[in-house]
C-alpha cells in the first residue's frame, strides 16, 4: 500500500513573546499583545528603531514625540527617549528595563510638583 501523506496542520496562533516575559505582563496587556498592535503603535515602533539606529554607540537617541499614552512598553523600546504628551507639553521619558511591565503613561507624570505655595 502506498503511504498516505498527511497534510501539515496550519497554526493559527502566533506568539509574540515566549519565556519569562509573558509572566511579567498582566492579563490585559498580554491579551492586547495577542490581538496585535495598531497602525499608530507600529509607526511609533518604527520611529523608535530609526532613532536608535541613527546614533553612534554609547549615546542617547533623539526624543520621539508621541500622543500614545496607552502603548505597552516592549523590550525593543529599552534605551529609547520618548516625549509623551500629557495634554499640555511633551514629558521626556527614557525607557528603562524596569518599565517593561507597564504602560507609557504611568511613567510620565502629568503634574509639576510645587515646593511651596504662599505661606
Image (spheres, grey):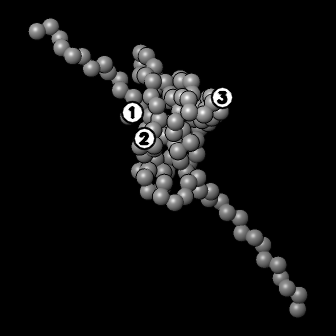
Whichever of callouts 1 and 2 sits on the residue coming sooner in the sequence is 2
Q: Can residue 23 be seen in this snapshot?
A: yes
Q: Are marks 1 and 2 in contact (CB under 8 Å)?
A: yes
Find disc 1 in the rendering and name its residue: 107
- Residue 78's disc number: none
Q: Is residue 38 above or below residue 7?
A: above
Q: Is residue 13 left or right of residue 25?
A: right
Tag nearer the camera, 2 or 3: 3
Tag 1 secondary structure: helix
- Identify residue for label 2: 99
Q: Residues within 10 Å of mark 3 (few under 14, many from 20)?
A: few
Q: Is residue 2 left or right of residue 73?
A: right
Q: Is residue 66 visible?
A: no
Residue where numbered disc 3 is placed:
54
Residue 76 coordinates in the image, percent (x, y): 56, 42
Count of labels in the image: 3
Amino acid at each position: 500500500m502506498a503511504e498516505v501523506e498527511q497534510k501539515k496542520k496550519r497554526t493559527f496562533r502566533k506568539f509574540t513573546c515566549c519565556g519569562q516575559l509573558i509572566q511579567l505582563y498582566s492579563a490585559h496587556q498580554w491579551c492586547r499583545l495577542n490581538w496585535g498592535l495598531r497602525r499608530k503603535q507600529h509607526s511609533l515602533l518604527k520611529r523608535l528603531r530609526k532613532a536608535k539606529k541613527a546614533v553612534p554607540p554609547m549615546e542617547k537617541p533623539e526624543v520621539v514625540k508621541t500622543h500614545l499614552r496607552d502603548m505597552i512598553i516592549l523590550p525593543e523600546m529599552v534605551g529609547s527617549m520618548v516625549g509623551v504628551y500629557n495634554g499640555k507639553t511633551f514629558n521626556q521619558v527614557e525607557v528603562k528595563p524596569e518599565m517593561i511591565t507597564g504602560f507609557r503613561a504611568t511613567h510620565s507624570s502629568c503634574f509639576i510638583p510645587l515646593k511651596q505655595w504662599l505661606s
